[in-house]
Image (spheres, rainbow, N blue to C red):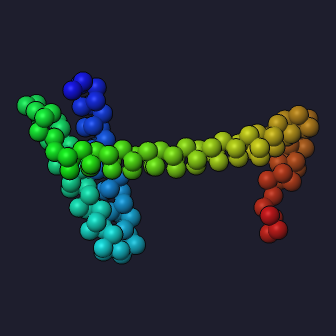
């Protein structure tokens, strides 16, 4: 097996372990004991898998079908997590391009004094109950 894939599989295991740890903390905060236990089991499983894949004497032929399934689950979890993060970043970028930057440009382009800038800024960034 190419070492780059072994490194990737190791990172998948580690990242999924970390994500499960976050879910565990979230579930604990929400007092969801069943969810917390499920996330803890997942975290522990991926920690063991990471340890196995990190062993210096790893025989890649010893990776079981169940472990390949865990790597698949980890890859899917990470992929979904990345998709959600990308969507959040797209929304943030859109907010900058559509809302914030045009308003800041107006303040710079339509005013000549600090007082005018403050007045326009207050108008543009006013929080309205109707919005």
Residue at position x 86%, y 54% in the image:
123
Please identify the quarter of the rendering in which residue 129 is found: bottom right
Residue at position x 90%, y 44% in the image:
116
Asked if one can make out residue 114 in the rendered structure from this viewpoint, the answer is no
**From what the image shows, is residue 5 above or below residue 107?**
above
Instruction: Name the residue furthest front.
Output: 65
Q: Position of residue 104 (x, y in %)?
A: 79, 40
Position of 1 compared to 86: left or right?
left
Position of 114 compared to 99: left or right?
right
Please identify the quarter of the rendering in which residue 45 is found: bottom left
Asked if one can make out residue 65 in the rendered structure from this viewpoint, the answer is yes
Residue at position x 70%, y 44% in the image:
94
Q: Position of residue 66 (x, y in %)?
A: 20, 50
The residue lying toward the viewer, choosing from 109 and 30, is 30
The residue lying toward the viewer, choosing from 107 and 15, is 15
Q: Position of residue 24 (x, y in %)?
A: 32, 63
Residue at position x 34%, y 63% in the image:
25
């Amino acid at each position: 097996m190419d070492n780059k894939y072994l490194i990737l599989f190791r990172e998948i295991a580690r990242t999924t372990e970390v994500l499960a740890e976050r879910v565990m903390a979230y579930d604990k905060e929400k007092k969801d004991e069943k969810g917390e236990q499920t996330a803890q089991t997942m975290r522990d499983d991926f920690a063991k898998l990471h340890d196995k894949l990190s062993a210096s004497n790893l025989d890649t032929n010893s990776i079981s079908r169940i472990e390949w399934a865990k790597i698949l689950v980890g890859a899917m979890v990470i992929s979904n997590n990345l998709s959600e993060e990308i969507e959040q970043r797209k929304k943030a970028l859109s907010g900058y391009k559509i809302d914030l930057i045009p308003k800041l440009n107006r303040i710079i382009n339509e005013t000549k004094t600090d007082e005018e800038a403050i007045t326009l800024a207050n108008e543009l960034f006013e929080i309205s109950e109707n919005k």
